Amino acid sequence: MSFHTAYSDTGLWGLFASVPYNKVEDFCYELTQEWMRISQAATETEVKRAKAMLRAATLFSGDSSQAINDEIGRQVLTLGRRMTPAEIDARINVCFLILVTIGGREGVTRLLPMALSTGMRHTPGLIALLPSFLQFRPLTPAW
């Protein structure tokens, strides 16, 4: 399951997964390869599918008063105001392939990854994951 949390000055993006202990390294490798592929070669079809999924998630996230209040709180903390449903839909509509590619390159290839695991002794260290992330990384630092 993937997640994204926006803050006023930064954001957090990642993935939760449950993987057999003997497949963790393979999973991490495939995951980093897919993230790199999306950051460089996403298709229009993938972007349309992601937009539809985001719309559905947004529509169904208001199924309780607590969920609605959580969303209002996130918007106020992030934007300083509450967005209307029409504004949310308009923001989703302006996502095009070029923006996904630019955002992917910024988020995947220019930032250092962080790995966290719980309940496992056989988790590959971050050093084992870095080659997958660094292969498309620019030679100059982002800062």
Image (cartoon, rainbow, N blue to C red):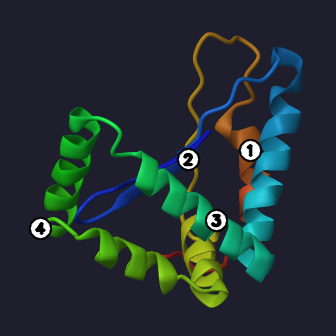
Q: Position of residue 78 (x, y in %)?
A: 21, 62
Q: Marks 2/1: CA distance?
A: 14 Å
Q: What is the crowding at mark 4: few (fewer than 14 residues within 10 Å), some, or many (at least 20)?
A: few
Residue type at numbered disc 4: Arg
Q: Nearer the viewer, residue 129 or 48?
A: 48
Q: State the SS at label 1.
A: helix
Q: What is the crowding at mark 2: few (fewer than 14 residues within 10 Å), some, or many (at least 20)?
A: few
Mark 2 or 1, nearer chain start: 2
Q: Marks 4/2: CA distance?
A: 26 Å
Q: Position of residue 118 (x, y in %)?
A: 58, 17
Q: In the picture provided, is 122 more to the left or to the right than 30?
A: left
Residue type at numbered disc 2: Gly
Q: Nearer the viewer, residue 114 or 37?
A: 37
Q: Nearer the viewer, mark 1 or mark 3?
A: 3
Q: Nearer the viewer, mark 2 or mark 1?
A: 2
Q: State the SS at label 2.
A: strand
